[in-house]
Image: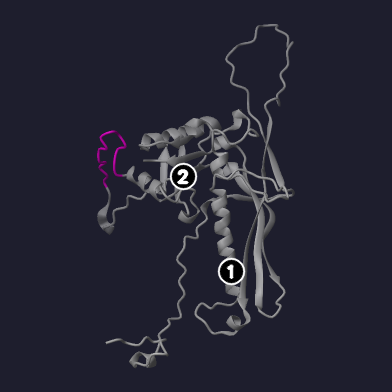
């Protein structure tokens, strides 16, 4: 026996008269956290190409000076100074609601204000994905190429571009792109960063899901070849076993471990990308602050767009690390 559907008005049947139940609940299921963008210091950009300078100190000398020796040679203390830069990138998300939809009573609701808010949420994810990407910078040429910023994946690299002098590139020891990622490897990355900065400033590991679980395993096993299970004494008064690693204390600094937005991760297949970031050495410069613009309604309904223009400032590529493969 065939039954009619609720909305099937062409074929008669009992279900035609059934009442529908539509809850006043709207669920949007999508990752929205933007840890890289949120943690970045915000500054103002005043040009489409933003530059900053880097410098270094001479290597320490243990040689003494002879008594009575005159100073006959002099050193240019700024010969190693270099200028780095990044282009701004424009981001835009449009929105509209028809005049009939604006007048309708819907779940959500689905009016122009909600459309505008949703566009803001989407553009923040666009920015986060671009900051985490391996995109190289590009300049507008009027022939199809638009302004594009260089992402973290390209800045934190041994070959970021010829514009970055070798002395200021991320050392190979601060980048891991191989198998068998262990706790020893993780500590070696932290140590490599320390040897560049000489500071135990707190780092933030923004980790995709597979890498985050690997870090958590450090609390379960020794990390050695035999993966000996660690014994941990804990107060079980609350009947809770916590093995998630949110703060990792190493010999050369504390590392806060946070989740990368999985929709914004560079590798959505292996899910093992991670950036070891020093918040003191990167920021975001806004050329056009995030804002909303309403366009004229020509009869079809309200419409507009949200946009912003900004760039990523990696003040010293050597102050950061990167993980691109763990197994």
Location of residue 125 by image quarter: bottom right
* Total number of numbered discs in the rendering: 2
**264 is higher (above) or lower (below) than 73:** below
Q: What is the C-alpha distance between the residues marked 2 and 1?
A: 30 Å
Where does residue 169 sit, x and y in percent of width and height? 58, 33
Residue 114 appears in the rendering: yes
How many residues crowd mark 2 within 10 Å: few (<14), some (14–19), many (20+)? Answer: many
Q: Are marks 2 and 1 in contact (CB under 8 Å)?
A: no
The magenta region covers 220-233
| Left or right, residue 308 beside residue 134 | right
Quadrant in the rendering for residue 151: top right
Q: Nearer the viewer, residue 100 or 79?
A: 100
| The N terminus lies in quadrant | bottom left
Residue 203, can we see it? Answer: no
Residue 271 percent across, percent down from the top left: 42, 49
Q: Secondary structure at mark 1?
A: helix
Which residue is drawn at the image coordinates 47% and 68% (left, top)?
28
At horizontal 49% and vertical 34% (from top left) the residue drawn is 174
Position of residue 83 in the picture relative to residue 41 (left or right): right
Q: Which mark is residue 170?
A: none
Q: Position of residue 258 (x, y in %)?
A: 45, 50
**Which is the main secondary structure of the residues drawn in magenta?**
loop
Q: Which mark is residue 117?
A: 1
Name the residue carrying label 2: 274
Label whose residue precedes the other's in the sequence (2 or 1): 1
Q: Between residue 316 and residue 50, name the one nearer to us.
A: 50
- Closer-to-camera residue (56/49): 49
């Amino acid at each position: 026996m065939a039954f009619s559907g609720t909305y099937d008005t062409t074929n008669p049947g009992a279900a035609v008269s059934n009442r529908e139940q539509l809850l006043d609940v709207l669920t949007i299921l999508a990752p929205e956290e933007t840890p890289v963008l949120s943690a970045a210091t915000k500054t103002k950009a005043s040009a489409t190409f933003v530059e900053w300078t880097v410098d270094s100190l001479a290597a320490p000398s243990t040689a003494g000076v002879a008594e009575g020796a005159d100073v006959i040679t002099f050193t240019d203390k700024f010969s190693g100074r270099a200028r780095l830069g990044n282009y701004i990138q424009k981001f835009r998300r449009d929105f509209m609601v028809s005049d009939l939809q604006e007048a309708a009573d819907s779940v959500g609701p689905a009016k122009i204000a909600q459309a505008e808010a949703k566009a803001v949420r989407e553009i923040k994810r666009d920015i986060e994905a671009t900051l985490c990407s391996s995109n190289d910078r590009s300049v507008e040429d009027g022939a199809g190429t638009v302004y594009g910023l260089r992402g973290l994946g390209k800045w934190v690299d041994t070959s970021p571009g010829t514009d970055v002098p070798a002395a200021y590139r991320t050392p190979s020891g601060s980048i891991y792109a191989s198998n068998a990622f262990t706790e020893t490897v993780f500590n070696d990355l932290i140590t490599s960063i320390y040897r560049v900065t000489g500071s135990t400033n707190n780092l933030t590991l923004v980790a995709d899901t597979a890498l985050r679980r690997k870090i958590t395993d450090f609390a379960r096993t020794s990390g050695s070849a035999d993966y000996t299970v660690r014994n941990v004494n804990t107060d079980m008064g609350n009947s809770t076993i916590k093995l998630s690693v949110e703060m990792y204390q190493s010999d050369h600094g504390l590392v806060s471990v946070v989740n990368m937005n999985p929709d914004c991760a560079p590798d959505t297949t292996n899910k093992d990308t991670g950036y070891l970031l020093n918040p003191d050495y990167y920021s975001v410069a806004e050329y056009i602050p995030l804002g909303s613009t309403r366009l004229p309604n020509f009869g079809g309904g309200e419409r507009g767009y949200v946009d912003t223009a900004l760039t990523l400032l990696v003040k010293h590529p050597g102050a950061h690390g990167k993980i691109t493969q763990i197994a």
